[in-house]
Amino acid sequence: MWENSINIHEVREIRSAGRIYFGVGAIDKINEVAQELKKKEIDKLLVVTGKNSYKKSGAWSPTEKALNENGIEYKIYDGITPNPTTHQVDEATQIGLEFGARAVLAIGGGSSIDAGKSIAILLKNTEVKARDLFEFRFAPTKAAPIIAVNLTHGTGTEADRFAVVSIPETETKPSIGFDCIYPMISIDDPAMAVKLPKNQTLYVTIDAMNHAIESCSNNVSSPLAMLLSKEAVRLIAKYLPVALEAPEDLTARYYLMYAAMIAGISFDSTRLHFTHALEHPLSGVKPELAHGLGLAILLPSVIKKVYASRSEILAEILEPIIPGLSGNPDESEKAAIGMEKWLFGLGVTSKLSDEGFKEEDIEILTKQVFETASLAALLKLAPVPSDENTVREIYRESFIPLSVVNKP
């Protein structure tokens, strides 16, 4: 395959709406980034990250050195958690404002980078709070510059204009999308991901796979989305088992990070639909639920629901995972169970009942899907009618394995 001809240790520059340094060793570009910031008279940064990953990954040592050598002052906010909250965004923004931060450096996976994007908006729009932003009372047109150092291979947020933050008071998890929050510069260094725990390796990659599947099967998809999604799924099918078996395999991490990036670029223009719309309420109600695990629980039922309407596309996209699909609309159940079997083979066997959800939660979850504006908008992009009964049925079928649901 073509990937055998790539030198993974050669850092490439990839352009989307911003600039991405991609490849093993890309973290060393942080010195050039610091020099560029200094030339732009950006001499104070708010560093947004979680408690440990920015150090454990190896990203912080060269970053700290680059900032110090270039005379850039910084404050660190390391309070970002998985499924970050509006409270964290407001707290970090206040620290940034008091410090006089002129840009945001987000180091981490989707949680830290999404929070960093949100903070960047508030640094330039001091009259509003995070809830104003995520409850859609305010639509920004400006944000502080964002530098993203990506440590995982899941969200693609280093290449797109979206951010997701939870509102604890309402147990909702809305998403925003604005041109002003494309990162100015991103760093994708696969070596930063080798210490990801096995479960996190699984869950972030499943997130990327869902981006690919949803972006190529919605109502506004494009030829570019088809191309990027097909390649993303192929690479994930090939390299995810390798990364699970050999976590420090840099080639596997390289192509998983690339797959996540191109899947992020794919959905940046085409958006998503059912799986993400229905997962956000799950991790909104239970913040301890990993986003990727929630997606894995829902995906087989979503495929069952939409396959007939996009059978030729999905048969081709899913070939590396579910070989033998012909594109016949009657294959919906075969495709759904095939996806579930693939996930189970990777060790992702949980269903909603295993994660503490009960049948009576379905009404609450369904209500949140339709009452959270950003999620209701995703449902409109689904390739089949997305009424409340359809949403309830997807949730209901996700309580136990489809192979059990469909027993005669």
Image (spheres, helix red, strand yellow):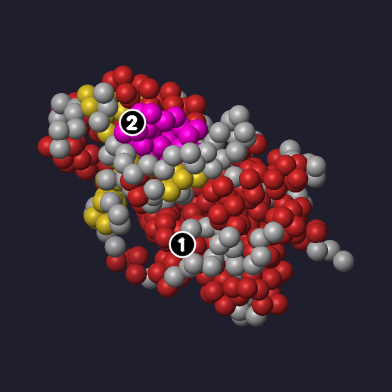
Element type at marker 2?
A: helix
Tell me what residue is drawn at x 73 percent, y 38 percent.
356
Few, some or many residues within 10 Å of mark 2 (<14, 14–19, 20+): many
| Residue located beneath label 2 in the image | 123
Type of amino acid under label 1: Thr
402 on left or right of 91? right
Picture quarter containing residue 187? top left
Tell me what residue is drawn at x 19 percent, y 32 percent.
42
Q: Mark 2 or 1 closer to N-term?
A: 2
Asked if residue 189 is among those painted magenta in the image, a careful observer would answer no
Few, some or many residues within 10 Å of mark 1 (<14, 14–19, 20+): many
Tell me what residue is drawn at x 42 percent, y 30 percent.
128
Type of amino acid under label 2: Leu
Q: Residue furthest left?
A: 39
Asked if residue 124 is among those painted magenta in the image, a careful observer would answer yes
Q: Position of residue 223 (x, y in %)?
A: 42, 73
Q: Position of residue 65 (x, y in %)?
A: 21, 29
Magenta segment, prevailing SS (helix, strand or loop): helix
| Residue located beneath label 1 in the image | 270
Q: CA distance from mark 2 to mark 1?
A: 29 Å
> Which dot, 2 or 1, sits closer to the camera?
2
Span of residues in magenta:
107-134
Q: Position of residue 219 (x, y in %)?
A: 53, 67
